[in-house]
Amino acid sequence: MDELNAATDVAHQKGYKVSDGGLTGVPLSLMVWKDYWDRGLKNAADDFARRVFSPQSKASSIYDQLPSSAYPNRPFPPAASDIVNRYNWTVQAVSALKSTQVDFVNFHWYLDDAKGFGEVADYLRRVTAKPVISNEVGSGSDSPATVTALMQKALDEHMAYFNWFSEDINIKGSVATGGADAGEQAKSAKP
């Protein structure tokens, strides 16, 4: 974070705005889930997990590992070591970002749940006291409704910056139909 602060000082002297490089959606989603759980909002935590870590999600393997109202004694964080490492790093990064001079907190989102996207943005805004942006949002879904919902949520969240990122492939590696038409779907979102 020292390097980020030094770079931010230089950028601010030149009149530029700065964000971090982008926190990722799955570890951030675990942080939001844990925030609900720790505040005693078990139903909200269960609902969030069902939507964000659904069987259709690229993060579906996490769902059955999380504590829930039905299985409150499951350990947290989930046992998968790559998830634990990414989660722990993200917890430290979010904590450190609170005291930096960056103008925005940036996160990447490749999960299809628009409500979850908004919940992550709200959480980051609340815990860092900084405006939130996203310079990488994408979907593996072929549904134009998913693209529109995510774009609409970014508008609803009053994000200063939002960038749809499409490699024109879905998460299974086949050609996407929804992502390639993101520009057309953006026309449906209402400011």
Image (spheres, rainbow, N blue to C red):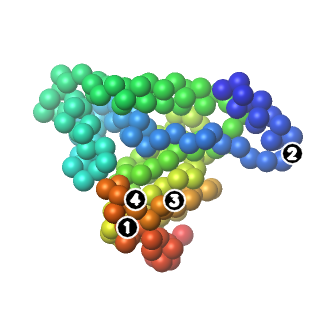
Amino acid type at image mark 3: Phe
Element at label 3 = loop
Q: Nearer the viewer, mark 2 or mark 3?
A: 3
Disc 1 crowd, CA 10 A, few/some/many (<14, 14-19, 20+): many
Q: Which mark is residue 139?
A: 4
Q: Are marks 1 and 4 in contact (CB under 8 Å)?
A: no
Tags 2 and 4 in contact by the CB under 8 Å rule? no
* Dot 4 amino acid type: Ser
First reached walking from the N terminus: tag 2 or tag 1: 2
For this rendering, which residue is in front, 133 or 83? 83
Q: Secondary structure at mark 2?
A: loop
Disc 2 marks which amino acid? Lys
Q: Residue at x 72, y 28 (%)?
A: 3
User: Which of disc 3 and disc 4 is earlier in sequence?
Assistant: 4
Task: Specify the farthest residue to the left.
Answer: 70
Q: How far apart are labels 2 and 4 at the CA level?
A: 35 Å
Residue 66 shows which numbered tag? none
Instruction: Tell me how far mark 2 sits from mark 3, CA to CA.
Output: 28 Å
| Cα distance between the residues tagged 4 and 3 | 9 Å
User: Image point 56% across, 59% down: which residue?
Assistant: 163
User: Residue 84 appears in which quarter of the rendering?
Assistant: top left
Figure check: 117 above or below 64? below
Ranked by sequence position, the earlier of labels 3 and 1 is: 3
Local SS, label 4 = loop
Q: Is residue 57 visible?
A: yes
Q: Which residue is mark 3?
A: 165
CB atoms of marks 2 and 3 within 8 Å: no
Q: Position of residue 160 (x, y in %)?
A: 62, 56
x, y percent for residue 111: 37, 51
- Of mark 1 and mark 4, the one earlier in the sequence is 4
